Image (spheres, rainbow, N blue to C red):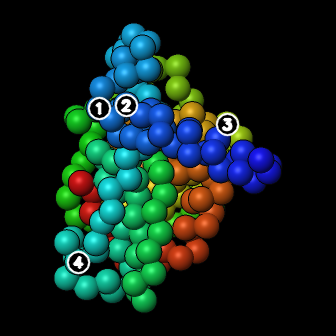
Amino acid sequence: MTTTTTRRRALAGLASLPFLAAPGLIRAQGLGALNRPDTGAQRNISSFTTRDWRDHFDALGVGAIVCDVSSRALSFWKPDGTFRVYPTSVPLSEELTRRGYTEVVRKKVGPTWTPTASMREIDPSLPQSVPPGPDNPLGTHAMYLGWPAYLIHGTHDTRKIGRPSSSGCFGLYNEQVAELYPMVEIGTQVRVL
């Protein structure tokens, strides 16, 4: 038996295991599918859903973004129809989630984070603002939406990606927001589902 044959058999054997062949089944059944108790804790699992811009917009214009809370993903289309999808953090609760149509109205490299009045009411220890740098919750790049205090931005805390962890924004890995940032033009249409 050759090494290649052994690897193929090993991969085939792994693929036949139910928890590797059907990750959606595990998510649907909780960790109980692995004979471990389901604690109810949020797990960092994204279930990307394929989207088509035509289901949300009449034309691509300068570009289009769909932020999907349920699949914890941001889909982006350039004017030529080129498509990219990124895992995101999503709002902590339905009350913090604003759904509907808006657009990118401003962009900033090295944004300053200023907590909203409601954030400071909940946590008075929050600073007045945080300048650009590793302690800034907005990461390295920010794209401001037409709704005040709602952004698409990076994050230095990579544990937040794929989880409900924001106060309404959509956070991406810093490397991915840096990739997306130059492609997104002011006026890019956005839909939050």
User: Mark 3 vs mark 1: which is more N-terminal?
Assistant: 1
Left or right: residue 64 compared with residue 6: left
User: Mark 4 vs mark 2: which is more N-terminal?
Assistant: 2
In this rendering, the label closer to the viewer, 3 or 4:
4
Q: Position of residue 17 (x, y in %)?
A: 47, 34
Give amino acid for label 2.
Ile
The quadrant of the rendering that contains the C terminus is: bottom left
In this rendering, is residue 63 above or below 45?
Answer: below
**Residue 150 shows in the view:** no
Residue 135's tag is: 3
In this rendering, is residue 34 above or below 51?
Answer: above
The extreme bottom residue here reads 80
In this rendering, the label closer to the viewer, 4 or 2:
2
Q: Residues within 10 Å of mark 1 (few under 14, many from 20)?
A: few
Residue in the picture at 33% in, 35% down: 25
Instruction: Identify the element where label 2 is drawn.
Output: helix
Q: CA distance from mark 4 to mark 2?
A: 31 Å
Q: CA distance from mark 2 to mark 3?
A: 35 Å
Give amino acid for label 4.
Arg
Instruction: Identify the element where label 1 is drawn.
Output: helix
Instruction: Identify the element where label 3 is drawn.
Output: loop
The extreme front residue here reads 1
- Disc 2 to disc 1: CB gap under 8 Å: yes
In this rendering, the label closer to the viewer, 2 or 3:
2
Name the foreground residue: 8 vs 36: 8
**Which residue is disc 4 drawn over?**
54
